[in-house]
Amino acid sequence: MNKPLTIAMPKGRIYKEAAALLKQAGYHLTLDDEDTRKLILEFPEQNIQIMMAKPMDVVTYVEYGAADIGIAGKDVLLEQDRDVYEVLDLKISPCYVAVAGLPDQPLSKIAPKIATKYPKIASDYFREQGEQIEIIPLNGSIELAPIIGLTDRIVDIVSTGRTLKENGLVEYEKIADITSRLIVNPVSYRLKSREIDEMVQKLSEVVEVEMS
Ligand code: PRP
């Protein structure tokens, strides 16, 4: 039998949505309860291996060929600009990247500070606006930064809007709509084109039906 097709999947909420989509496409990759701490899951009957990774790391595994395929948020792809093929918009986990802050707070005139875990997206956006900003990189709970007066604004993901609301913040501008994408390692695409094309085709049919 050929080497298994390796898929890097983000842990957490996206996993469930992606696994559901794959199941509809004929790939049964459901996690059993006792498997939730395992990092590599084998599905020999389908010749598939799943690697459970942090969402920000999925693209790294795919770029280096450790995984043939990955499921990654468009936010991560915009931020990292890696050498992978983005082959399909899976249209799951929709959210967007936005600029937010305390209400009625104009941006400081001199080098406003922006807290974010997306320094590239934030820098690109404010450069296009002609604003010279200072990025304060943070890894999570970004909303804290303007509340405690560390920064003027944040650039972060908004999904339901609940985190902003419950912390008294408002949205100023939307930067980009985000969904999860299927990405492929360029060499794998050449060497395993049959299996990969088949998966892309099946998934695109499911996505189309889901959206109609
Ligand atoms: C993300 C994001 C926001 C929140 C938005 O954080 O950074 O904080 O979700 O979701 P909402 O609009 O539905 O409230 P995540 O849960 O990934 O944790 P983090 O703060 O550690 O990044």
Image (tube, rainbow, N blue to C red):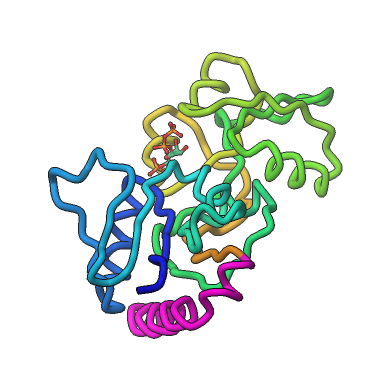
Q: Quadrant of ligand 1?
A: top left
- Residue 158: percent from left, percent from top: 47, 46
Q: Which one is in front, 98 or 44?
A: 44
Q: Which one is in front, 168 or 39?
A: 39
| Residue under the image location 59 percent in, 15 percent down | 149
Q: Which residues are magenta?
A: 186-210
- Image quadrant assignment for residue 21: bottom left
User: Quarter of the image containing the C terminus?
Assistant: bottom left
- Residue 171: percent from left, percent from top: 55, 42
Left or right position of 201 against 113 = left
Residue lying at the far front in this picture: please name it. Answer: 1
| Residue under the image location 26 percent in, 42 percent down | 38
**Residue 205 lies in magenta, yes or no?**
yes
| Residue under the image location 13 percent in, 43 percent down | 34
- Image quadrant assignment for residue 30: bottom left
Q: Which one is in front, 14 or 68?
A: 68
- Residue 118: percent from left, percent from top: 62, 39
| Numbered circles on residues, count | 0
**Residue 140 lies in magenta, yes or no?**
no
